[in-house]
Amino acid sequence: MENQTIIEAEGLTKKYGHQTAVNNLYLQIREGEVFGFLGPNGAGKTTTLLMFLGLTEPTSGKVRVIGFDPTRDPFHVKEKVGYLPENVGFYDDMDARQNLQYIARLNRIPDRISADRITESLKVVDLLEEVGKKVGTYSKGMRQRLGIAEVLMKEPKLIFLDEPTIGLDPDGTNRMLDLIHSLSREKNITIFLSSHLLDQVQRICDRVGIMIKGDLVAMGPIEELAKKKLGVDKEHYTLEEIYMKYFKEA
Amino acid sequence: MHGIFTIFRKEMEDHFSSIRFLLISALIVMVGVIIASMVGMSIQEESKGMAKPTFIFLWLFTSTGKLFSFVQFIGFFGPLIGIFLGFDAINRERVSRTLSKLLSQPIYRDSVINAKFLSGVAMIAIVLVAIVLIISGLGIRLIGVVPGGEEIWRLVIYLVASILYISFWLGISILFSVIFRSTATSALASLAVWIFFSFFVSLGAGALANAISPVSQSASGIDVDAALRNAQIQRTISLFSPMTLYSDATTTILDPMRKTTQALILMGPLERISLSRFQNPLPLLQSLFIVIPHLISIVAITLLCFGVCYLIFMRQEIRTI
């Protein structure tokens, strides 16, 4: 089970007019791992996520997510995959429970089951005490955690997180990272996380991929990349050093 | 289907709890009641001591009284209901960043736009049925006449036509909410279209008709043929406005004495003979035959408008959403 492939991309390409957003991407993600998808802004990270979800059609190439082709069968993919967009939005005039219940209904989770699931997932993200407040009054960190709760409620096998810690204060960032880590360890959920905040990714990811201008320039466990780029005997390395090396080459 | 139903339900809840909707429906009900009571009272006075004419009940809706009739009022201001209900349908979700989240749930993409349109249509139907019932109730009290079966059918057809007509405006405003990212822009664009069709089409029709077929005024009077042609052109152009389509159709369906949707001078010889020979009201079916082209045109433009909106929404790249 541990090594089953959950995402597989072969030659995935997306062009907007003449501009290539994602170029010939080959990628394999195994079940249960935390994968960090790195790259500067505009490198094509979000576009890749959208193609994995079937929200945008690839120009060419093949992709399979949890065994389905998202382009042809987006319905099944969206049913089992949770997606937290960058700066996720909520209906500000509803409270947390109402927001989650709406999403639960869209997922065809019956109200009697969703009530428990909502309580449970709000407990995981530590928002149970704020449940009655309108989401409009939530802080950025709370909104982001509510987004995680919303994704968890679907009981997904795979979660896509697009810049989950952007705009959070240090405390919020730490809580978010711990949360992501525990989801992977305790619930065995595969996590695909895109970010440009390298030290955070280094803390929680098993493997990383570095994307620059639409090309995946490197992929593998962080130690391996360090060996390859920084030399074998370097003891202390940071992801940032590796990243900058790739970035300068590209 | 499940997705449509869930979104529909939420949209209805939103509409009912929104202050915007409360304001516009209060306004429409208030003006409707004022018009109806004024018209009702004047009918009451005029018909004192004489046999009440048939179809007096429908006068409540068509008689202009001192200001304007209810039918004219809905023809002119009804579009605002549609625009108010739809101008931020899609871009509100975009601004609050909920649209991409919504679309990443297991629903079909068109459920979103279908449910938004349908909930708008449902709200329009609720408002219109309510106001027509209120006016009818008021009318029964004021005039003391209960509507007959045929009058009720005429009102039903009027209601269906009005719901379709306002749904057209709903479609226009949803279209702009798909195209424009800012809710203010889409509201203004919808209002601009409304103003264009309500004022400028009729003005422009007159100007264009004068340009194509000028009516020369000479010593021997006006050229009748040219004047007729001028009026004909003017009418044809003004039919491009949904407002003209709607008001022609509804005044005809609500007034059995009207035997054509055309203005009097534009009638053909046969219609003129029939009008002078037969003074009886038209049966319902015949009235319906006269306005059926108008009704079909209203259905067509409503569907066309929603179709364009649907296509644009389905083809939009998610990145721009």
Image (tube, rainbow, N blue to C red):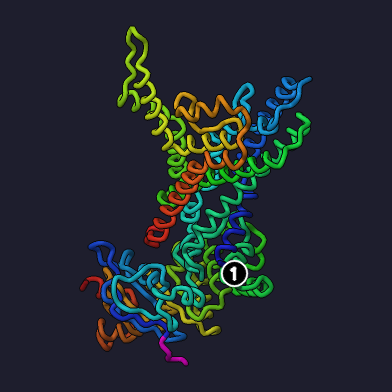
Residue B241 shows in the view: yes
Residue situated furthest top in the rendering: B219
Q: Amino acid at mark 1?
A: Ala
The residue tagged 1 is A104
Q: Is residue B248 above or below residue B319?
A: above
Q: Secondary structure at mark 1?
A: helix
Q: Position of residue B139 (x, y in %)?
A: 73, 33
Q: Residue at x 56, y 37 (%)?
A: B250
Q: Is residue A229 above or below residue B220?
A: below
Q: Which range is magenta?
A: A1-5
Q: Would residue A129 appear left or right of B48 to someone viewing this image?
A: left
- Chain letter of mark 1 equals A
Q: Position of residue A179 (x, y in %)?
A: 53, 75
Q: Residue at x 46, y 44 (%)?
A: B297
Q: Position of residue B241 (x, y in %)?
A: 44, 37
Magenta-span inclusion, residue A106: no
* Pick the front one: A234 or B151: B151
Q: Is residue B165 above or below residue A70?
A: above
Say which quarter of the image contains residue A71: bottom left
SS assignment for the magenta stretch, majority? loop
Q: Residue at x 61, y 27 (%)?
A: B279
